[in-house]
């Protein structure tokens, strides 16, 4: 459904509390842990809704959440 709404393939995977999945499941996956998280995102489809769901533990990101970070070519030690 998300791909139909966006009109393009999802760039990340999505996995919901009920076991449903969308998009690629290898790489970065947005994990929606409860209906409450989905409600927060629908009622506030912006940074605020996303932050509330994440801070409450109802939403998580698995995998590389910063595409390209592996290409940085080094460590940040000493910074």
Image (cartoon, helix red, strand yellow):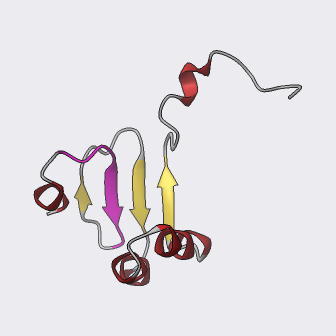
21, above or below 12, in the image: below
Q: Quadrant of the N terminus?
A: bottom left
49, above or below 15, in the image: below
**Residue that extends furthest to the right in the rendered view of this protein:** 78
Q: Position of residue 34 (x, y in %)?
A: 41, 78
Q: Is residue 63 left or right of residue 26?
A: right
Which residue is found at the position 69% from the left and 17% from the top?
74
Q: Position of residue 11 (x, y in %)?
A: 30, 43
Which residue is found at the position 15% from the left and 46% from the top?
8
The span picked out in magenta is: 9-17
56, 48: nearer the viewer: 48
Q: Is residue 75 left or right of residue 35?
A: right
Q: Position of residue 26 (x, y in %)?
A: 35, 39
Question: Which of the 4 image quadrants contains residue 57?
Answer: bottom right
Question: Which of the 4 image quadrants contains residue 76?
Answer: top right
Q: Does residue 7 belong to the magenta stretch? A: no
Q: Position of residue 52 (x, y in %)?
A: 55, 76
Which residue is found at the position 18% from the left and 56% from the top?
6
20, above or below 49, in the image: above
Which residue is found at the position 89% from the left and 25% from the top?
78
Q: How many marks?
A: 0
**Residue that extends furthest to the top in the rendered view of this protein:** 73
Q: Quadrant of the C terminus?
A: top right
Q: Is residue 75 left or right of residue 46?
A: right
């Amino acid at each position: 459904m998300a791909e139909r709404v966006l009109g393009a393939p999802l760039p990340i995977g999505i996995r919901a509390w009920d076991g449903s999945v969308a998009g690629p499941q290898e790489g970065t996956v947005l994990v929606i842990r409860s209906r409450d998280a989905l409600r927060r995102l629908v009622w506030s489809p912006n940074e605020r809704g996303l932050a509330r769901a994440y801070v409450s533990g109802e939403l998580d990101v698995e995998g590389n959440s910063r595409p390209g970070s592996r290409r940085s070519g080094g460590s940040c030690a000493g910074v």
